[in-house]
Image (spheres, grey):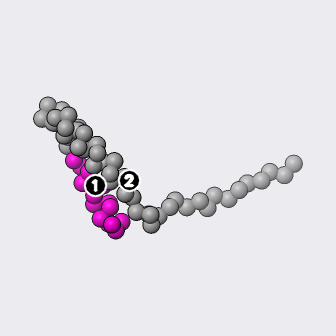
Amino acid sequence: MTSEEQIAKMKKAITQAIKVMGDRFGSTEADVEKAIAELKSSMQTAPASAPQPSQGVAAVTVGV
């Protein structure tokens, strides 16, 4: 799965979760469980080539 496909899957899962969680009276427990499961699966299949945050923090030494 490409990173674009992964992002699209995550956006769809997040949108669905927001919809389900926001509709307390119209959503069933099954809807909530399904939304949570989709969120979890979208996060677990994150692409390995995702950019990592830069770790260019310089070490500071103090001379005594």
The answer to which quarter of the image holds residue 12 is bottom left
Residue assigned mark 2: 44
Q: Is the residue marked by circle 1 packed among few (<14), some (14-19), or many (20+) residues within 10 Å?
A: some
Q: Which of marks 2 and 1 is nearer the N terminus?
A: 1
Of tags 2 and 1, the one toward the viewer is 2
User: Left of 1 or right of it: where is 56?
Assistant: right
- Disc 2 is placed on an element classified as helix
| Place of residue 18 in the rendered image (x, y in percent of width and height, measured from the top left) | 24, 43
Q: Position of residue 21 (x, y in %)?
A: 23, 38
- Residue at x-position 32% and y-position 61%: 6
Dot 2 alpha-carbon crowd within 10 angstroms: few under 14, some 14 to 19, many 20 or more: few
Q: Does 58 sit left or right of 10 as displayed?
A: right
Horizontally, residue 31 falls left or right of residue 47, namely: left
Residue at figure coordinates x 19%, y 40% from the top left? 31
Say whether residue 18 is visible: no
Q: Any magenta on residue 2?
A: yes
Q: Which mark is residue 11?
A: 1
Left or right of residue 53, residue 43 in this image: left
In the rendered image, is residue 27 in sight? yes
Instruction: Looking at this view, name the residue that lies furthest to the left.
Output: 26
Q: Which of 37 and 21 is in front in this view?
A: 37
Q: Quadrant of the N terminus?
A: bottom left
Q: Residue flagged by tag 1: what amino acid is it?
A: Lys
Secondary structure predominantly adopted by residues drawn in magenta: helix
Segment tinted magenta in the rendering: 1-18
Give the mark count.
2
**Residue 63 location, x and y as percent?**
84, 52
Please state the horizontal and vertical placement of residue 49, each as a whole percent of the image: 45, 66
Tell me if label 2 and label 1 are in contact, CB under 8 Å. no
Residue extending furthest toward the top: 25
> What amino acid is labelled 2 in the image?
Gln
Give the residue at x 55% y 61%.
Answer: 54
